[in-house]
C-alpha cells in the first residue's frame, strides 16, 4: 500500500513540474514515505533520514519531507530528532503536497499537515506504475474499523472510507488505456469495501464489474480479513475468469485464546472452514498469510496450535513476525510479555516449517502448464525472463525481450523454495498438451 502511496506522490509532483531522479545527490526534493506498523520499518526510516542530514548540510536549498504512518504518529515531534526536515504530512494529506511545497518556497517555514479529513482525497489520485509496468495498484478504500489490539492502522490511517465504485472503474479504464493488464486492488480490509457507501455496493459486485472491463486480464487484491470473507466472494473464484487463483488471508495465530486477545473476531475453526470452502470452489488456489509470534500471553501450547493450523492449511507462503509493541494499541497494556529469546526461537521454528510447506506446494506444480505475465529481465540472470503465475509464484525462463508484457504459457521444469524454473512452450505444444 505504501508503494502505491509513493506512486501517487510521484504522479502529483509530476504535475508540479518535478522529475524523478534515482540519485539523491542531485535531488531538489526528497520525500520519505514511512510505515510504522512494525518497529523495524520505523528504524529504517530513521536511518534513511540520518543519511540525508549530510546532503542537507551540503545543499541548504534541498527540501526534505516525511510522509506516511510514522509522520502521522509523530507529527511535529519529528523536528526535535531531525531538525533538517522541512515538512511533515500524514496519511490523509498526500493531496496537499503542492500547497505544502509552495508555502515552503514562499515563506521558508516548516509545514506540518497531519489532520484527519472527512474524505481522503488522495485515494483518488490516478497514478501509473513505474517503468511502464503492465501491473498496477488501485486503492479501493482507506482505513480500518477492526481495531485489532496489536495494530496501529485505525489510529494512523483513520476509519474506513470506500471509494465510489465508478471512480475505481474510471481509474482502471485509464490504466488499461496506458497498457496495464493486471490490477491489484488495495485496502486495509478489501472484504468490507462498500460498507460506507451503500448496501448495494460490496466487494464481490466491484470484482464482477472489473471483470467486464476489456483489457484487464488479471485481478488480484490485498488484504482480506477472514471475518469478512463472504460466500459471495468465495463464489467469485469460480465466476470471474480474470480473478487470479490467490488470496492473502492473514490468520495471525492458530490459538483461539490469542485470537480473542488480538480482537480478531474469528476462531481457528472459523478460519479453517473458510479455507476449506475456498479450496472446494477453487482447488488450485494459492493461500498466503501473516502470523505474529510471541503475542503477550502466548504459551507454548498456543504456539503449537499455530503450527498445527499451518500443517492443516499448508500455506503457499507466510509473512511471519515477532510481536513488537506499538504506541497507542491495546496490546501495549497486556501483561505476560513473552521474552525476546523465546519469540526469536518460535519464529525460527515457524519459518523452518513454512519453508517445508512452501517447497512442498511448489513441487506440486512440476510438469504443469502455467500462464505467465512476463514482467521483464530476471534480477538473478540477464539471460532469463521473469514473471508470475496466476497463483502469484515467480517463474524464470529463457526467452526474448519481445515477450515482455505478454501472457505466455510455460511448463514448470523445476520448483525451488522461492521461485520456479520454467520453459517456454509454443502454441502447438500447448495444443498437444
Image (cartoon, rainbow, N blue to C red):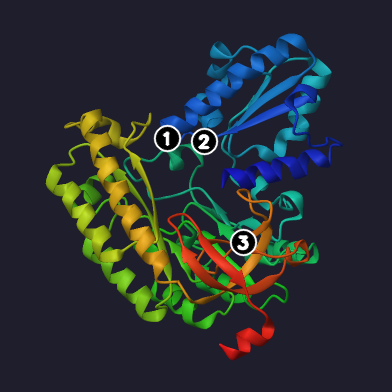
Residue 363 x/y as whole percent: 40, 67
Asked whether residue 162 is in view, the answer is yes
Please tell me how crowded label 3 is: few (under 14), some (14-19), or many (20+) other residues with Cα within 10 Å: many
Q: Alpha carbon of mark 2 to alpha carbon of mark 1: how far?
A: 8 Å
Asked whether residue 202 is in view, the answer is no
377 or 163, which lies in front? 377
Does 41 appear above or below 25?
below
Which badge, 1 or 3, is on the more N-terminal residue? Answer: 1
Q: Alpha carbon of mark 3 to alpha carbon of mark 2: how far?
A: 27 Å
Residue beneath disc 1: 38
Residue 271 x/y as whole percent: 29, 64
Q: Quadrant of residue 288?
A: bottom left
Residue mark closest to the camera, 3 vs 2: 3
The residue depicted at 35 percent of the width and 64 percent of the height is: 360
Residue 239 x/y as whole percent: 51, 82
Please tell me how crowded label 2 is: few (under 14), some (14-19), or many (20+) other residues with Cα within 10 Å: many
191 or 395, which lies in front? 395
Q: Alpha carbon of mark 1 to alpha carbon of mark 3: how far?
A: 29 Å
Mark 3 vs 2: CB contact within 8 A = no
Does 325 appear above or below 9?
above
Mark 1 vs 3: CB contact within 8 A = no
Q: Please indicate whether residue 97 sits to the left or right of residue 199 in the image.
A: right
Query: What is the residue that sits farthest to the right in this orientation?
Result: 17
Residue beneath disc 2: 35
Q: Please indicate whether residue 393 sits to the left or right of residue 231 in the image.
A: right
Figure quadrant of the C terminus: bottom right
Q: How many marks?
A: 3
Residue beneath disc 3: 387
Badge 3 element: strand
Please tell me how crowded label 1 is: few (under 14), some (14-19), or many (20+) other residues with Cα within 10 Å: some
Does 91 appear above or below 251?
above
408 or 255, which lies in front? 408
Amino acid at each position: 500500500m505504501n508503494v502505491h502511496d509513493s506512486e501517487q506522490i510521484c504522479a502529483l509532483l509530476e504535475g508540479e513540474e518535478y522529475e524523478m531522479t534515482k540519485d539523491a545527490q542531485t535531488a531538489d526534493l526528497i520525500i520519505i514515505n514511512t510505515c510504522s506498523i512494525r518497529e523495524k520499518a520505523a528504524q529504517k526510516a530513521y536511518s534513511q533520514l540520518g543519511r540525508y542530514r549530510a546532503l542537507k548540510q551540503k545543499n541548504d536549498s534541498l527540501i526534505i519531507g516525511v510522509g506516511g504512518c510514522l509522520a502521522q504518529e509523530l507529527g511535529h515531534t519529528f523536528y526535535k530528532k531531525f531538525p533538517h526536515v522541512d515538512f511533515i504530512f500524514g496519511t490523509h494529506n498526500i493531496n496537499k503536497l503542492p500547497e505544502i511545497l509552495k508555502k515552503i518556497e514562499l515563506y521558508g517555514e516548516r509545514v506540518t499537515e497531519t489532520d484527519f479529513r472527512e474524505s481522503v482525497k488522495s485515494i483518488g489520485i490516478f497514478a501509473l506504475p513505474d517503468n511502464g509496468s503492465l501491473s498496477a495498484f488501485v486503492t479501493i478504500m482507506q482505513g480500518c474499523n477492526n481495531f485489532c489490539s496489536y495494530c496501529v492502522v485505525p489510529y494512523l490511517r483513520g476509519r474506513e472510507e470506500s471509494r465510489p465504485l465508478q471512480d475505481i472503474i474510471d481509474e482502471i479504464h485509464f490504466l488499461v488505456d496506458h497498457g496495464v493488464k493486471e490490477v491489484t486492488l488495495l485496502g486495509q480490509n478489501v472484504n468490507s469495501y462498500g460498507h460506507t457507501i451503500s448496501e448495494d455496493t460490496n466487494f464481490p459486485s466491484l470484482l464482477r464489474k472489473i471483470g467486464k472491463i476489456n483489457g484487464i486480464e488479471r485481478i488480484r487484491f490485498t488484504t482480506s480479513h477472514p471475518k469478512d470473507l463472504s460466500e459471495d466472494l468465495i463464489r467469485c473464484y469460480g465466476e470471474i475468469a480474470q480473478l487470479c487463483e490467490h488470496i492473502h488471508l492473514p490468520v495471525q495465530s492458530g490459538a483461539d485464546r490469542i485470537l480473542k486477545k488480538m480482537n480478531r473476531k474469528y476462531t481457528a475453526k472459523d478460519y479453517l472452514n473458510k479455507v476449506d470452502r475456498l479450496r472446494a470452489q477453487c482447488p488450485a488456489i494459492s493461500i498466503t498469510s501473516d502470523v505474529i509470534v510471541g503475542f503477550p500471553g502466548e504459551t507454548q501450547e498456543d504456539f503449537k496450535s499455530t503450527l498445527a493450523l499451518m500443517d492443516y492449511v499448508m500455506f503457499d507462503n507466510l509473512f511471519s513476525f515477532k510481536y513488537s509493541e506499538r504506541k497507542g494499541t491495546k496490546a501495549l497494556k497486556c501483561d505476560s510479555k513473552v521474552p525476546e529469546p523465546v519469540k526469536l526461537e518460535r519464529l525460527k521454528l515457524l519459518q523452518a516449517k513454512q519453508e517445508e510447506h512452501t517447497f512442498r506446494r511448489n513441487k506440486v506444480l512440476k510438469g504443469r502448464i502455467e500462464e505467465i505475465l512476463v514482467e521483464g529481465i530476471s534480477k538473478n540472470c540477464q539471460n532469463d525472463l521473469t514473471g508470475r503465475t496466476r497463483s502469484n509464484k515467480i517463474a524464470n525462463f529463457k526467452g526474448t525481450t519481445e515477450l515482455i508484457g505478454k501472457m505466455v504459457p510455460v511448463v514448470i521444469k523445476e520448483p525451488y523454495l522461492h521461485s520456479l524454473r520454467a520453459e517456454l512452450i509454443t502454441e502447438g505444444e500447448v495444443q498437444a498438451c
